[in-house]
């Protein structure tokens, strides 16, 4: 039994899994995203939109992402574990098409993920709290 509890605790110490995001403007659930690990870094992709029309595309994106479907898009890249935080990544905001520096940190025993996007210094940004959705 102790091994099982330890295994569960270890899993929750990782951001890998599915997360529900919320709209900054309305506070309503917005999407389900999947955080996955590849090449020693953590990345995130949109797996389902909860409010937008099916087939929504990134109209504000530039480059190869312009006009691409939001579902399936990898919008969070390159976060690396540093102690209990994940730093040095980037996050795309599909609403404005801009890419920001990113960091994230688990809280509430791994049930919440605080994701911060910022320009330059971390104080110049905003934080969203995502809820584990499994």
Image (spheres, rainbow, N blue to C red):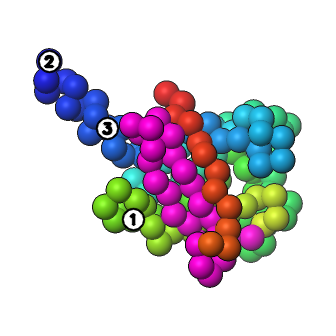
**Residue drawn at the location 62% of the way across and 37% of the way down:** 20
* Label 3 close to label 1 by CB (< 8 Å): no
Residue 109 within the segment the image draws in magenta: yes
Q: Is residue 49 above or below residue 106?
A: above
Identity of the residue furthest to the left in this view: 2
* Label 2 close to label 1 by CB (< 8 Å): no
Secondary structure of the residue carrying tag 3 is helix
Q: Is residue 64 above or below residue 2?
A: below
Crowd rating for badge 3 (residues with CA inside 10 Å; few <14, some 14–19, many 20+): few
**Residue drawn at the location 13% of the way across and 23% of the way down:** 2
Residue nearest the viewer, comparing 75 with 101: 101
Nearer mark to the viewer, of 2 and 1: 2
**Residue drawn at the location 78% of the way across and 66% of the way down:** 97
Mark number displayed over residue 1:
2
Crowd rating for badge 1 (residues with CA inside 10 Å; few <14, some 14–19, many 20+): some
- Residue 35 position in % (x across, y down): 49, 47
Residue segment shown in magenta = 98-122
- Residue 75 position in % (x across, y down): 62, 58
State how far apart marks 2 and 1 are (Cα): 31 Å
Residue nearest the viewer, comparing 22 with 95: 22
- Which badge, 2 or 3, is on the more N-terminal residue? 2
- Which badge, 2 or 1, is on the more N-terminal residue? 2
Question: How many numbered discs?
Answer: 3
Residue tagged by mark 3? 11
Query: Is residue 82 found left or right of 74 in the rendered image?
Result: left
The majority secondary structure of the magenta stretch comes to strand
State how far apart marks 3 and 1 are (Cα): 17 Å
Residue 47 within the segment the image draws in magenta: no
Residue tagged by mark 1? 80
Secondary structure of the residue carrying tag 1 is strand
**Residue drawn at the location 54% of the way across and 51% of the way down:** 114
């Amino acid at each position: 039994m102790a091994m099982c509890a330890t295994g569960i605790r270890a899993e929750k110490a990782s951001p890998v899994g599915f997360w529900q995001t919320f709209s900054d403007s309305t506070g309503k659930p917005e999407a389900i995203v999947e955080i996955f690990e590849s090449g020693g870094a953590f990345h995130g992709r949109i797996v389902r939109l909860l409010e937008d029309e099916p087939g929504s595309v990134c109209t504000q994106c530039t480059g190869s992402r312009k006009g691409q479907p939001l579902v399936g898009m990898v919008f969070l890249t390159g976060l690396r574990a540093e102690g209990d935080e994940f730093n040095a990544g980037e996050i795309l905001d599909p609403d404005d098409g801009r890419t920001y520096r990113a960091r994230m940190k688990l809280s509430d025993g791994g049930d919440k993920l605080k994701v911060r996007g910022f320009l330059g210094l971390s104080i110049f940004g905003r934080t969203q709290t995502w809820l584990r959705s499994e």
